[in-house]
Image (tube, grey):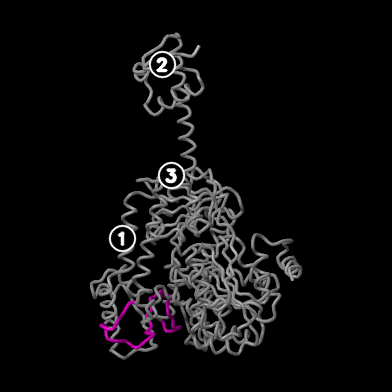
Amino acid sequence: MVMEALDVLKQYWGYDSFRGIQRDIIESILNGRDTLGLMPTGGGKSICFQVPALMREGLCIVITPLISLMKDQVQQLKTRGIKAEAVYSGMMREDIVRVLDNAVFGAYKLLYISPERLSSELFLAKLERMRQVSMMVVDEAHCISQWGYDFRPSYLQIAKIRHLLPASVPVLALTATATPKVIDDIQERLGFRETNVFSMSFERKNLIYVVRETEDRAGELLHILEGVPHGSAIVYTRTRQQTVDVARFLEENGITANNYHAGLTNAEKDYRQINWSKNRIRVMVATNAFGMGIDKPDVRLVIHYNMPDSLEAYFQEAGRAGRDGKTSYAVILYNRQDIKTIQRRVPETYPEPDYVRQTYENVACFLQVGVGEALGRTFYFPIETFCRRFKQFPVQTNAALHLLNNAGYIEYHEEQEFKSALHFILRKDELYRIYENDELTDLLIQTILRTYPGVFANFVYIEETYLAHLTGMTAEQIYQRLKELHHHRIIDFIPHRQTPTISYTVARIDTDLIGLPSVVYADRKADFQQRINQMVHYVTSQDQCRSRMLLEYFGEHSDHDCGQCDVCLSRKKSSASEADSLSSAIQTITDFLSDGHPHPLSDIKRLPITSPVLDEALRRLTEEERIIQQGLNVKWSS
């Protein structure tokens, strides 16, 4: 079995051997055992399911929230001659149906799917018809745990999916960050038939952890980037506006940079990520929306411009540095105000239950939904307009909606992206007659017709950035020309928009009946507070090795310091300084007693030596029998 796995690895990936615990995980899943693999970022998780997927009969279903990872892995598999496809939010329904139908008829070895799609009636209907499922893979498995730092209610659907599959279908759960408590919870929620965990060490010997307290955050950031001039860098900020401001600051100071956050269109995200991946820019300044599924080997610096909310989030983001094994740095910049800011995250993320209930009431009023109505209905929800009308703060409102989501009353999507769509009203021959003298518009129309078939029959989704790439125009020029075509009734054009949505998963109930179970509110609030306390302890600690602190947090014992983090280096410097002070003190005492006469101890204590160093110097000289103490006098030993 292992030899066959090695043959597959060599045939499709060109490797001669497995790394770390890859072999153990693959052997376990091939034996039909439910398996949990704990592998730090960059540990080679995908090999652990792609190899056995090719060896087992049937279709491997891979559940992951990372759309960019899906696209990247599907493309890589196809280039290797492996049949794979993906289903995720934002795809047109006909494309989803086509992919799922092909999966039913056995056209793929791997099908990637986002957790939000699992509960759709379409997927469930197709799943029942799939001839043979070889295994189910749950990536980012910590998202299923209520104790995980990134708990996602959509992941709870996975356990239900498992019940629809034959009992013989094994589950492989993979994650890069999990505490012992989360490890147990993952296995319980996925219905593991037995405890079965394989874990790599979380120690990254090539990664140097640094914490710097500074009041000049921008200046310190520039100093660090100039001090490590080679390789790429990621700078994580807390807000979208900070990504814009910091990227602009770096550009003004001669460092190529761009920004990235969830508010950008998918096309813009892809474009900026490609520029960074191909080293056209050095620094990506981003919120935590960036980095999942990114496997760039030469990232030398990951800098957190603000304190992260948890050690789990920090460890995963920091782990994107140094994947090629070369020395790299993970740096946190902070000041005392940051500690107050991060502590405020608790009441902001978990507002009072009465506030949550009032938000539920106000939302129903805003959407004009009566008691007993709206089951299964989805509404656009312009949160800024809502907050202005009901005088609520956006941060707490957003948190309240997530709590209502987690409690099962609504389904709230904070960043639901809707692509631009268009439909030609005029016939093709009429288009040429009207625009025969407008070369740019004619070029745009020709490009659309070549790129998007069916535009005369139905609405089709388009990407302005992609059209700009094909035509040589800017995305703004494309957008303005499409608006002009719409104005002249040549096309129907619906511009791209990102609008939060709310779906009622249960019909609206009386507000007084809204309850927040402890598993949704009280327990998670306490757990969140504890994670923040751990984060504060990490950045303020000056007497513990950073690497050992992280390892112990994830349940891994370490009997040695890393010797290279800021704390370890500070200790070395302090030890060297103490040794110099002691040597100097011994020399001063030796010179004072060089006349061979006894001297009062009180005179020696008047020498320019601090008390602790003086006491240690006298102790050392006495032990070595270089001086003799007689009563209150001291003399050089002859």
Q: Looking at the image, which is closer to me, 504 or 252? A: 504
Q: In this view, does 140 lie above or below 532?
A: below
| Above/below status of 331 relative to 346 | above
Mark 2 nearby-residue class (10 Å; few <14, some 14–19, many ≥20)? few
Please say if 44 is above or below 520: above
**104 or 637, which lies in front?**
637
Disc 1 marks a residue whose amino acid type is Arg
State how far apart marks 3 and 1 are (Cα). Answer: 26 Å
Q: Does the magenta stretch include residue 548?
A: no
The reply to whether the C-beta atoms of the residues labelled 3 and 1 are less than 8 Å apart is no
- Category of crowding for the residue at label 3, using alpha-carbon neighbours closer than 10 angstroms: few (below 14), some (14–19), many (at least 20): few
Using the image as rendered, state which of residue 365 and residue 512 is in the foreground.
Answer: 512
Magenta highlight range: 488-516
Whether tag 2 and tag 3 are in contact, CB under 8 A, the answer is no
Instruction: Answer with mark 3 or mark 1, whichever residue precedes in sequence.
Output: 1
| 200 lies left or right of 347 | right
Q: Residue 543 carries which label?
A: 3
Q: Mark 1 points at which residue?
A: 344
- When asked about the image quadrant of residue 287, the answer is bottom left
Q: Where is residue 377 in the image (x, y as percent from the top left)?
A: 38, 87
Q: What element carries label 1?
A: helix
Q: Which residue: 30% across, 87% down? A: 509
Q: What residue type is labelled 3?
A: Asp
Task: Point out the frontmost of discs 3 and 1.
Answer: 3
Judge from the rendering whether residue 27 lies leftward or rightward of residue 237; answer left or right. right
Amino acid on which disc 2 is placed:
Gln
Residue at which label 2 appears: 630
Q: Which of marks 1 and 2 is nearer the N terminus?
A: 1
Q: What element carries label 3?
A: loop
As for residue 505 lying within the magenta part, the answer is yes
